[in-house]
Image (spheres, grey):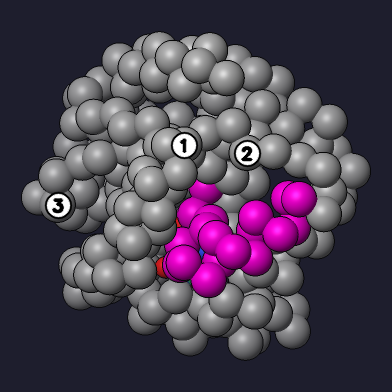
Amino acid sequence: MHLILIGAPGSGKGTQAKKLVNHFGIVHISTGDILRDAVERQTGLGLVVEHYMRTGKLVPDTQVDGIVEERLDAGDLDNGFVIDGYPRTVNQIQTFAKAMHARQRALDAVIRIRVDNRVVIERMSSRRIDPETGRIYNLKLEADRPPPEIIDRLMRRPDDTPEVIIHRMATYHDDTLPVVKRYCETGQLVLVDGAQPPDTVFRDILTELEAITSKR
Ligand code: AMP
């Protein structure tokens, strides 16, 4: 199974990616995670992309295309993957299609999680990460409250501040909605409502995937 997951920052992509990984036994590829790791380790790539990421701008296509191609060759993708955060521009779609074709892999579907801007901004402003476990909490969700003993060590992602969030949302609309439109034209798009509870979103994804894959 080869899936692309598209959604604005804060749409719940990460949560749904984990569920897809468990359900299909596939690998999760997140360009955001790979880039953040490079920045944290201050690798050559990290030093080049740091400024873009801190200001909520898209990293140039060449850098991102390079890390995706490298990831496709890592040798752990026998069952396929769900890729999140890529392709994010129309140029990246073309490079990705060529990269997949060259490796004799075929894309099964593109899942778009749609959430209202207001909901996304609210979710992201209340999102905190535990640096020790990597677990993400939402301070406003009753069911997602962190245990009191770890509250002091929770951190905000540097690009989850209100100013950067607004910039990331604008970038998403300008660059990524054309990507959604393109995949809609190819008939590979699956649309789900991300304002629902995570389990309901996942159930909708599975239903839509079955519908799209059974048509082939
Ligand atoms: P994410 O965690 O997917 O929201 O990505 C965090 C940041 O990484 C984005 O704001 C961009 O700066 C960068 N990034 C991730 N994926 C891409 C991509 N496909 N193209 C360009 N920049 C990306």
Q: Is residue 196 visible?
A: yes
**Looking at the image, residue 96 lies above or below residue 59:** above
**Image location of residue 128, percent across then percent down:** 35, 49
In the figure, is residue 118 to the left or right of 60?
left
Magenta-highlighted residues:
84-101
Earlier sequence position, callout 1 versus callout 2:
2
| Mark 2 to mark 3 CA distance (whole Å) | 28 Å
Residue in view at x 44 percent, y 14 percent: 211
Instruction: Tell whether label 2 touches label 1 (CB within 8 Å).
Output: yes
Q: Which residue has dot 2 on it?
A: 107
Mark 1 residue element: loop
The image's mark for residue 117 is 3
Q: Amino acid at mark 1?
A: Gln
In the figure, is residue 20 to the left or right of 111?
right
In the figure, is residue 2 to the left or right of 209?
right
Q: Amino acid at mark 3?
A: Asn
The image's mark for residue 188 is 1
**Image location of residue 29, percent across then percent down:** 64, 46
Q: Amino acid at mark 2?
A: Leu
Mark 3 residue element: helix
In the figure, is residue 54 to the left or right of 3?
left
The image's mark for residue 100 is none
**Image location of residue 160, percent across then percent down:** 31, 62
Is residue 95 covered in magenta?
yes
